[in-house]
Image (cartoon, rainbow, N blue to C red):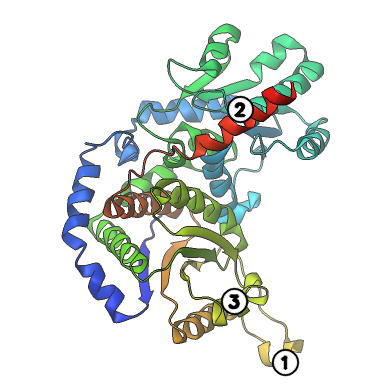
Amino acid sequence: MGGTITVNYAMGEEILRRADGYAAEADRHCGTLRARDLPYTGWVEYASRLTDGELAEIKALAEVIRRKCTVFAVIGIGGSYLGAKAAADFIDGGRGSKREKDAPRLVFAGFNLSGSYHERLIEEIRDEEICICHISKSGGTAEPSIAFLALKRLLTEKYGEAEAGRRIYAVTDAENGVLRAEVREKGYKSLVIPADVGGRYSVLTPVGLLPMAVAGIDIGQVIEGAKASSAPALMRAAKRLACVRRSIQEEGKTVEVIGAFEPFAAAFTDWILQLYGESEGKDGKGMLPVGVGLSRDLHSLGQFFQEGNQVFCETLIDIANPPGDIVVGADGGFYAGKRMSSLNAAVRAGMIEAHRSVGVPIVTVGVTDASAHCFGMSVCFFEMVCAVTGLLMGVNPFDQPGVEAYKKEMMRVLRRES
């Protein structure tokens, strides 16, 4: 298995010329990242440092889980679930038939505080064989903590306390936090989130690899794809894209519209939104990342894209060889005999031409296919693009101080109401 990533630019020459001026600085930042001289850069080339023994441990634990359950409930928020959700949907187009047939179904909890969502989820899985996994570095974030309590209660009611404990798994900090303390007290099986990896960069650590393996995804191929992202051509492409994104910002663009023409890539887009937004949105800088589904949103937002306030650029994710296709039947008139994938490609080409004609800067990131290999490669590619862009902007792409603001206000409201 192989594959690669290509990047194409449809935009004014001045943007590209200005990007050239950032090339030397991008080279320096990339070198600093690969040397891991900055805090929270343990994600850089993590796949190359992951030992066969560590990978085997994840696979072995996943196999234990697979023998116990038909549903694996992944509890987490932000980077603790978006990567796993992206992988489950993206790889093979999310089609379980291409994976091992006995793989449990992944469901996700703890990424909101909706009682309606969690009540319905619990009712949907109540009669299944269930295991749950709480993914959190600290274990103290409200949304996953509350969901963990609800699902733990379900397990206890269904299996009794002892068996419930054998069906609970954790991915958390090695030493600290309330979740690690509960792991020690209750004896849950657990894996470790590396201390030098932040949540949104943690997809290819046990945070994402365990749910992927439980779902029947070949995590060995995911890791091989991640390793391949260090190839010189892909590193050059990542640095170039970072320089172009930095240059686009100097055009006064404040919004980056990110979309794919395959619905199975929607969760991958969601992961990119967190990666870009949480890494770059600081000190009054950065572009607001906004996700769209294509071609769907051309029929709702397309008017704005074509003739609205031009505060945005576009990043399009193109899966060159999607895992499925349909040929239009003979009764399809003009479309008869054409593959839907070719029609999709025509819409994409038409969108690019139309939007380019009114001055919208457009980047197309082409990925060979929806394989596990290409998923791992794509994750590392976008992580490097994001980190280098942030450093070119003069912000720290590895902290998120603004995220704490709503949490403090939430606790203040709850204390006032109690």
Query: Left or right: 363 with respect to 79?
Result: left
In this view, the mark in front (3 or 1)? 3
Q: Height in image: 284 above or below 83? A: below
Badge 2: few (under 14), some or many (20 or more) residues near its Cα, within 10 Å?
Answer: many
The reply to whether the C-beta atoms of the residues labelled 3 and 1 are less than 8 Å apart is: no
**Which of the 4 image quadrants contains residue 93?**
bottom right
**Which of the 4 image quadrants contains residue 211?**
top right
Instruction: Single out the residue that lies furthest toward the bottom.
Output: 334
Q: Which mark is residue 333?
A: 1
Q: Identify the element where label 1 is drawn.
A: helix
Badge 1: few (under 14), some or many (20 or more) residues near its Cα, within 10 Å?
Answer: few
Residue 122: % across, % down: 79, 32
State which tag comes first along the sequence, 3 or 2.
2
In this view, the mark in front (1 or 2)? 2
At a point 67% along the width and 76% down the height, the residue shown is 299
State which tag comes first along the sequence, 1 or 2.
2
Q: Height in image: 360 above or below 254? A: below
Residue 323: % across, % down: 57, 62
Amino acid type for the residue under numbered disc 3: Phe
Query: Which quadrant of the rendered structure holds the C terminus?
Result: top right
Q: Is residue 412 visible to us here?
A: yes
Residue 97: % across, % down: 65, 51
Q: Identify the element where label 3 is drawn.
A: helix
Query: Left or right: 208 with respect to 412?
Result: left
Query: According to the image, label 3 marks what residue?
Result: 304
At a point 55% along the width and 76% down the height, the residue shown is 305
The reply to whether the C-beta atoms of the residues labelled 1 and 2 are less than 8 Å apart is: no
At a point 77% along the width and 37% down the height, the residue shown is 121
Q: Which mark is residue 133?
A: 2
At a point 44% along the width and 37% down the height, the residue shown is 401
